Each structure stands twice: as structure tokens, then as C-alpha cells.
Amino acid sequence: MAMSLWLAVLIPGAAAILLAFHRQHQAQINLWASALACIAALLAVLGPAHAGTVLMLDAINKPFLLTTGFITLTVALSCPYFLEPAGKGGAALFYPLFQAFSCTMQLALACSNIGILWVALEGATLATVLLVAFNRTPQAVEAAWKYFVLCGVGIAQALFGTVLVAFAAHQALDDPQQAMNWPALHAAASHLDPTVMGIAFVFCLVGYGTKAGLVPLHQWLPDAYSAAIAPLLAMLSGTLLNVALYALLRIKMLTDAALATSASHDIPNMLLLAFGLASTLLAALLLLRQRDIKRLFGYSSIEHMGIATFALGLGTPLATFAALLHLLCHGLGKAALFIIVGAVTRKAGSRSTERIRGLLHLDPRLGWAFMAAAAAMAGLPPFGLFVSELLILTSAAAHQPWLAASLALCMVIAFAALLRQVQPMVLGEAPAATTMQTKETIALWPSWLQLGLVVILGLLMPPPILHVLQNAAIRISIPLP
Amino acid sequence: MLPLQILLFALAAPLLNGWVDMLRARLQNRRGPSPLQPWRNLRRLFAKEPVVPHTASWLFRMAPYVMFAATLLASSALPMLTVQTPLASVTDVLVLTGFLTLARVALMIGSLDPGTAFGGLGASRELMLSALAEPTLLLGLFSLAMTAHSSNLAVLVGHLLDTGMMLRPSFLFTLLALLMVAGVENGRLPADNTTTHLELTMVHEAMVLEWSGRHLALVEWSGHMKLLFYGILLADLFAPWGLADHASPAMLALALLCLMGKLAALGVVLALTEALLPKMRLFRAPGMLNLAFLLAVLGLFSHVILEHNP
Amino acid sequence: MTSMPLAEQGVAFLAGLVLLTSFVLLSQTRLVPVIYACAIQGMCVALVALLRGIVDGRGELLVSALLTFALKGLCIPWMLDRQLDRLALHRSAEVLDHQGLVLFSGAALVVFSYWVVLPLAQMASSIHGSVIMVSLAVVLLGLLMMVVRHQAMAQVVGFMAMENGLFLAAVAATGGMPLVVELGIAFDVLLAMVLFGIFFLHIRENIDSMDVDRLSALTEESGVVEKQWP
């Protein structure tokens, strides 16, 4: 189904261009484009694998494509609610960039060329940077500038790494035209020069790690999160972080194969373990100190990215499966959470964790939704994140007991901090009604849908999804020829 | 042969300075003195009776002679017209810079000896600058020496002549570094100014204030020779074409013509920079020398990185 | 070096020039010369690609060389220069702290990139392995420039220098990437420059200065900034 794969990339791109010039019915066009792109992605994933010169579909990018399409659709549903106060001018800027961002995400996942992957990820920064500065306040401009500069610098390192991969492939492949093509690289992975691939991996880790918000390259993330509007946050957390880790994962597969016979074969894994553990630890420690609700959940994203990176560093099929499940559940849950958080801040008229109180009293619907989403992020059963974290801990305990213990400690700290922060917001005493704007309503069903999926992933694990995740995990963790 | 070269060098030295002065005057829309003016100055100074401060010792009287002799010795070893000078076997770059340092030390001791304020001030400033300039000069010469695998200047220039025209990135860096060093060492703008006597800024001029008569003539003559020394050094290293490889009269005449052309061009460059650049604050000068040192280091790096084929 | 063909000498010389301009960027305090140095660097990088394209006989590389020359040598410097005009920054100079230290850490970065790329350079054919070293050094020096400069415009020039280094790396390591990728990267860079232009105006509007050190409202300690849309 190469056709539907193309459509999944081209529909958002075409919609972005259309929306840039067409100012009427933007919300509807946005929604329809997202829906069509999601359906196209679904059809593509249901079809057979495909390896073209530009786009490709294999076991690894299937789960990512599906999640990204679905999250984009559900976020698009709630966009109008958030853009109302911005007026026509704001919306005219928002919708084209939203679709452009969605296009770069799909392209990054579906492209078969490591250079285009880089171009798409850089394009994602460019598409979102104006949206981070959307509010035009000094803080928003500062956050956007940091985001722009740090991500730009980081991603430049990834391009250097990409060039080195192409260099190694040049030495190993007969046809230099194929030097940047994933399928060709996979086929020749074990012939790539180990030294070059080792250096390339480090550069890519720094570059894509910046995008994924791994400590100590995470500085842009909390700032950008505290300034950006809710639908953008849902997209950043739900898709961009995942795609950045996907890119890193691909490079790691090549590196693993190239280093298989050399003495330093476990260095990529060690690096991922170290970055993952550092991210989880720092984020867990900082969660308690946050006073801005969006910043709070920004650190929660860093924590979960750290856990997923840690699991990828373990490298066993089970841990890889758990990492993929974790990324999937986190993407869905975080997208739901940020939409709800956006509604909560509108309702309470504040973003301060000290001034949002008693949501259950104010608006029970919203309060329950917020509680459920926060519980999902804290890794409580029956949500999928509980299962994935448990799987990660057990597979870590089998190989690296000490690391497993430290990771468990970090998770407990993060859990306690989130509980401590969220509990008064939901259950505390509601302040006097003067500051509350109780008229607003938001359709919460897309968020409930996402959270419901996270529960289903945690309890039942439907066979088709299990199959897709299993295939991907096996492809990733079995060494390339 | 050797006496001839030394004589030629010593006689030609004031001319280069005169040439630069004339060009600079023209660039400033003045008629300026004739290029022979430094000669006339020297003749006049030699005719005058030297006055020695009563606080000065024999060091003060000896310093101009030592300085003159050391500079002349250094220049006698340079491959001026031909590579095969009689002193070719001892013209190591270390020896050359050693002679120049000796001249500088003599100048500084001589200027400190009478115990006047200006002498001490000039000497301390000169020391500050030369402490930074000399390592740069050596480092620059070393990175060139790595190309020829010898720090002997005659061998180095011979090697450059043999390999012919090549684009070497390390030479680019070293050229820039040596140009800066040469400017500072000769008290030229933007680090120093040979034409003012402001106590806030002067370096070289502050040191020579107490000398007079033939002593002053020798000090100034040494200054002219130092400028010519750097001119010939730069010409030898970065544009060695035209140097005679054996001492036939025709070849020597050609070499002399080439050298005069190169030095004239260098004089134009020097006059232009002096006309265009403003004087730098004295305490900014170390910054410039730092940059020169950095360029020399980069010259070394780029030799290792770009030209050294394993 | 003595046995090197002329084209390779040219490449080595241009690589040296690129490295030199990187240090000029690092040490120059006034913005107009900084932009010119950046333009010269872009041109040198494009010329390296041109030389290699001619030697290898690859049309693709010639196209991307011309594109780079137009974009990084002419178009983007022109855009930056116009920004300077608009923001009335033609005469502004910034005070650099610890300039000696910065320059010598730059030299240390050159040594570091030599150390990193040495095993690679021995694999590559001819001079191009050495050019990879230079390109990594240029990338890291651009990074250093972005770290030590406070002026938004100077940081953007540092960003451009990094892009130049990356292009040089691509040319040296693989003889240029596929044209699609080159076009994509060029498009990204151009777009980034347009966005940077918009940001200059925003920054100027918000803090009355182009000193990005003053963008410091967001820290772990700062409170919550209200008055925003959710």
C-alpha cells in the first residue's frame, strides 16, 4: 500500500498549504485533513511492508505511524476550543503550522533516507517554533528562542552523525547512491566500519537526544512547555518526542550490528542506560518543585522518555517491547493529559499549581478526567504505563539488578511527587468562585478515548496491536545480518 | 662574498624605511621626504658629538654597539640573494631569533641604565610585547620548518624553492601571524607608532630618548636593519622565487631585482596598513599578539591535519 | 604534500581558509565584518564542493555547490545585512569576556576534533579525511560562538557557521549527499533564517535590546507567569 503511505505524508502537507491561503472553515479543514491522514496511515500499516526510494514501511515504523496519526486526529478535535480567544489572526497562523508539523512527523517516520529523516526533524522544529512564541509575551519569546537555538544546535550534531553514517556506508556499499537508504544500510549493517559508526552514534545520540529531551540536553523542554499552548504540547509530547527516539533507535540498530564483533560492542547500550537513568532521576527530583502545571508535566515527559531510553538500552526483546509499549501509552496519555490541563487552566484562570484547587467541586467531569490522566502518568494500574514500567523493571532486574533498583527508586519518587502535586489540585478546597469562569465547556471525549486506549493496552492488549509491537520489538532487538 | 652581502644589507636598510615613509606621506597627501632621508639623518647624527647622561655607566655606551653588531650578525646569515651563503650551515632559526633577542636585551639594558623614567617605561612595555611576540615568531617558523624537516633557514628556503608553488594552508596562517609579529617588533602601527613621542603610547621611542650623536645613529640604524631583516625573512619564506641557487653574476643581479621588487611591494603593504589602521590602545596590543600566537598554533595544526599524509 | 595534485592542494587551502574564518568569527566584535566573514566561509565551502564535483565529474555536486554559493555566500548574508539595517545595528559592537580564553579553547576544540576524526581520516581517500577534521572543528567552533556570544545576531551567525561545517563534512565524507537531501537541508536553513528574522523583531520588541542574556525570565526558581492563553 505504497499509495496510502504517500497519502499519509502528502495530505497534511497539502492541507498546510491550503490552510495558509484559505482563511475560512480552517477548523473543519484541519480536522478532515487529520482524519484522512490518520485513515491513510491505518491503511498503510494494514498493508504489506514496502521499501521505496523515498518512503518505506517496515515492522519498526508501523506502531509509530499509527500512534502519530491517531494522536494528531484527536488533538485536532480539540483545537478550536483553545484557539477561540486567540481570534482569527492566531488561528490563521496555528492551523497551517499544525498541519505542517504533522506532515514532518509522518515524513520522518515513513521516509527511507536518513538525510530526509534529519530534514523532517529539523522541519518539525521550524514548524513549531512560532507556535511556542504564539503568546508573544516576553516569556513566550524567550522560551521559543531557547527552543530554536538549543534544538538547532543539537540537531546539527545529528546531521554530522548522519554524514558519518553515510561515510561508513560509502566504504561498505557497492552503490554509493544507496548510502543513505535504510533498507540498504540494514542489509550491509555488519560491514559498516565499527569506529566510524561508534562516533556517528555518539553524535546522533546528542542530536536526537536533545530533541527527545534527554538530560542533560533537556533545557529547552520545560521552558518551551511552560510557554506553549495546550494542543501544541499534546503534539510535542505525543509525537515529537517519540519520533526523536525512533530516529535514535534506528541509528542504534545499525551501530549495534557494526559493533557486534568489536570489543566495545555494548557502548551504545551503556550510553542509552546512562542517559535514560539520568533523565529519570533528574526529572523525578524536580517534579516536586514545579509551580507551573505545564512545566510539571513537561518534567513528567522527560521522566518517561528517560524510562523508555533506559529500556531501549537494555536491548533484550522483552525490554524493547516494553519500551515501545511505554512510548505508545505515554504518547496517548500525555496528549490526553495536556488537552485536559489546557481546559483546567482555562477553568481555574491560572497555571499555578498552588492556585488550582478543588477541581472535583468546580467541574466534576473535568476533575475526574484530570485525575485519570494524571494517574496514567504516575503509572498506576490499570493504565498501560503500569504494565510497561513493570515489564521494564523485571527485564532490568534479570540483567542489571542494581540499575533496576535505582530505576525503581526514581519511579517511586516521581510517583510520590506527582501524587503530592495533583492531590490538592483535584481534591482540595475550591477557592471563592470569583476567579472561576465556569461557563466554558470542552468536548472531553477525545481525551477519554485516548485514556481508554491506554487502559485497554494495559488490561487486554488486543492481538493486532500485540502483533505489531511484537514484530517491531523482534526486528529491533535481533541483530541485523 | 660575505662582506659584500653584509655591506649591501647595511647600506640598503635605511632605504626601505625611507621608501615606507615616503609612501605613507603620499597616502596622507603630503609630499614627504625623499627615500634617502634616513641616510641623511644618519650622516648628520654621526657628525654630532654624543652626550652621555652623568648617571649612565659603560652599559649605556656599549648598548648601541652590541645592538648594531647583533642585528648585523643576524642579517648576515639570511639567504638574501642566494641560498648558498657562507654562513648557511649555522643559519638556524633559533640562532637568528637569538641574535635579535640579544639586540633587544642590549637596547633595554641601555635604556634602563641612566635611570630616567622614560627609559624604564619604554623597556617594560617592550618586554611585555616581546615576551608575547617572540614565542609566536618561533612557533610560526617551526611550523614552516616542519614542512622542510629542518629548522635551518637555508635548507628550508631551498626546500621551498625545490617543491615550487604549492597552496599550503599552514603557510597562510603563519604568514598572517608573522606579519603581525613583524609589525609589533618594528614598532609599527597599530601596536606602536614610530612618529610620535606621546608618553601614553610610545614604546620604542621612549627607550631611545637618552641617546644622541653616533650612539643614536647606531640605534636607529639597527632599527632600519631589523625592518629589512623581517622584510627579507618574509620574502624568503613566502615568496622565495628569484633567489639564486648558485653565485653567478647574472643570477645574482636577477635575484637582487626580484628582492627589490618584493621589498617594494612589502613596503606598499606596510604603508597602507599604517595609513588605514588607527593606533591601538597599548593594553590592547597583547590581545593582538595573542591572536598572532593563536594563528601560529593553527598554522601548526593545519600542517599536521591537512598536509601531513600518513 | 609534495605529491598532491593541484585540486587537492586547492581543497586543503580552502579548508584552511574555512578554519581561519571560523576564528575570525570567534574574535571579531563588530557585526558587519562578522557577516562578511560568514559569507566568505560559505563561499569557500561551496568552492570545495565545486572542486570535488569537477574532479569526480558529478553533476549533482556542482548543482549543490552553486546552490550553496548562492544561498550561504550571497543570499543569507544579504538577509542578515538587511536585518542589521532594519534594527539599526550597523555600528554595534559587543564586549567579549575572556577573549583569550575563548580563542584558546577554540584551538583546543581543533585538537579535539583531530583526535575524534583521526581513525576516520586514515580510512578516507586522499585529502578528504583531513577535511572531515576541519569540518568537525568548524561545527564545534560555531557551537562555541553560539555559547559565548550574547548578541542574537552573532548567535545566528554561529548557527550558519555550523551549517557551513556540516556541508563541508558532507562533501568531504561522501562527495555530497543525494540532491533531494541537499535541497531539503537548504530549504530548512533558508526557513530558519526567515524565522530568525522574525525573532529578532520579537526580541527587540520585548526586551529593547538584542542581548539574549536578558532573556532570563524562565528559570526553575521563577514563579508562574500568568496572562496567557491556556
Image: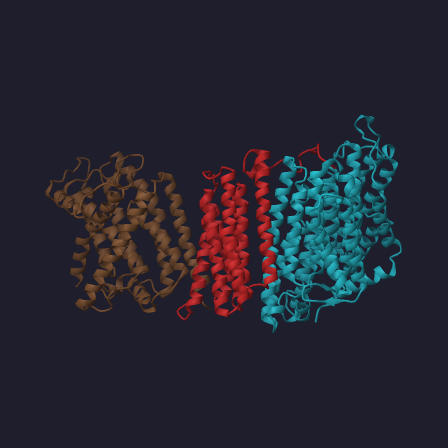
Indicate the position of residue C93 as horizontal and vertical percent values: 46, 39
Indicate the position of residue A286 as horizontal and vertical percent values: 71, 41
Q: Colour of chain B?
A: brown
Asked if residue B16 can be seen in this view, the reply is: yes
Foreground residue, C44 or A322?
C44
Q: Which chain is red?
A: C
Residue shown at 75%/46% (left/top)? A234
Foreground residue, A431 or B254?
B254
Residue shown at 16%/60% (left/top)? B4
Foreground residue, B99 or C179?
C179
Q: Is residue C154 left or right of residue A168?
A: left
Indicate the position of residue A81 as horizontal and vertical percent values: 78, 39
Q: Would you place residue A187 above or below residue B222 in this image?
A: below
Q: Is residue A214 left or right of residue C147?
A: right
Residue reaching furthest to the bottom: A174
Residue reaching furthest to the right: A460
Q: Would you place residue A352 above or below residue A415 in this image?
A: above
Q: Colour of chain A?
A: cyan
Q: Is residue A40 left or right of residue B243?
A: right
Q: Would you place residue B33 above or below residue C186 in this image?
A: above
Residue shown at 62%/58% (left/top)? A202
Location of the N terminus of chain B (image quadrant): bottom left
Q: How is the image coloured?
A: by chain
Foreground residue, C149 or A94?
A94
Asked if residue C175 can be seen in this view, the reply is: no
Q: Is residue B167 left or right of residue B246?
A: right
Q: How many marks?
A: 0
Tell me which corner region of the image, top left, top right, bottom left or bottom right, holds residue A464.
bottom right
Tell me which corner region of the image, top left, top right, bottom left or bottom right, holds residue C20.
bottom left
